[in-house]
Image: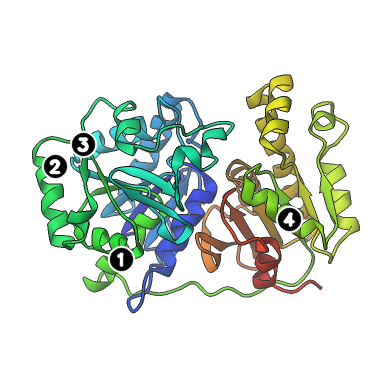
Amino acid sequence: MLIGVIADDFTGASDIANTLAKGVAPEGGLATAQFPGVPTSPAPQHVEAGVISLKSRTAPIEEAVAESLAALEWLLEQGCQQIIFKYCSTFDSTSEGNIGPVGQALASAMNARGVVVCPAFPTVGRTVYQGHLFVFDKLLNESGMQNHPLTPMTDPDIRRVLAGQTEWGVGHIAQDVVNQGSKAVQEALSEQAASDTMFTVVDATSDQDLLTIGDALVDAPLVTGGSGIALGLPRNFIRKGAAKGTATAMAPQSGPDAILAGSCSGATRGQVELHSAAHPSFAIDVPKVMAGEITSETLVAFVQEHAGQAPLVYSSGTPAAVKEIQAKFGQETVAHTLDALFADTAKHLIAGGYRKIVVAGGETSGAVAQAVADALDSPAMQIGPEIDPGVPVLILGEDQPVLLALKSGNFGAPNFFEKALSIMGEDA
């Protein structure tokens, strides 16, 4: 294995796995696999990039650090020459962490300095300029992320946010340096490292900037960022002759399918509304779930009743509705209960012969992916074709593979659900 990724949630892991598998023309990408949690056995020999999906974004800091260091140990044992700590392109974290504490622990373990910090993903509107993170034309704290129920982002200055989470200095490489090319970026990073600065926020407003930064990181042992930071990294190994630039083939699956949406983001709510207009949908009544009146059997029965019609089950709600429910039952209790509900539903669907499931929401995706991987005893999820920027099809198992599409809340076109199912295969 050449590149190892430690991702702080499941959909983010799929996002960067997609970037590594796709690469850029003409070189292409790497043979990539995603693992739900730290594996207990060696990676398949053909895997060139391995992405470990953790659920560490909102975990207690000590737990997030410990899991990330365990992932680092396994990846280094697989021979990885470069490690990426992947977090959300909107830098999702609380004022205390977990991005800073995890990044600091990884950098300390690898004795790395001048480590790049770049959440930019211009393809989906995330850019960094003068150290500030933008979502399209709005600063991060004006983009809607300030209302996130778990990680409200109220400061767009990534340098300031990170400085509050770590004990080390945070440097900055501005856009005008990036415009000068990879050598200028490399020299600036070397200067930062020599000054004992642990982290360096690097501006990026286009994919070309990410490729420039990627070229500068050819020998960097540790990199941090959103999935975009990996855009130019596979070709470094392909140019050296260490990798061939191959892609994983995917055979479309026939049979019934299902959509499970647990995200409350604006993008997902729009996707739910559009899909519900033409397909059967079931809006989960959360208080009834908490009371035990709605169970996974309820959801499975609805999906099976509408087999072949791309049925949708969702718990998405407006920020105000979500806050009201969280205030009544407790934020963590609601999140855990819904994640378990969706995971159990997916497990029953797989047992019933379903081979195509679309999932929306980072935490929901993590729970579902783990349940499916456990049910199939298939920890390695191969990366298939891209559905929308940052969202690939995941392939689990060999004889009768299951196809998953795990979508972060804010990702995907308005018709994402229908598009995903079309790529995964026709209904029986």
* Left or right for 102, reference 411: left
Which residue matches tag 3? 198
Q: Quadrant of the C terminus?
A: bottom right
Protein image colouring: rainbow
Disc number at residue 87?
none
Spatial CA span between label 1 and label 2 = 23 Å
Q: Is residue 350 visible?
A: no
Spatial CA span between label 3 and label 1 = 25 Å
Which residue matches tag 2? 192
Residue 424: horizontal and vertical position, in percent? 66, 69
**At label 3, which amino acid type do we have?**
Met
Spatial CA span between label 3 and label 4 = 42 Å
Quarter of the view holding residue 117? top left
State which tag comes first along the sequence, 1 or 2. Answer: 2
Which residue matches tag 1? 208
Outermost right residue: 305
Identify the residue shown where x is 64% and y is 65%: 401
State which tag comes first along the sequence, 2 or 4. Answer: 2
Which residue matches tag 4? 259
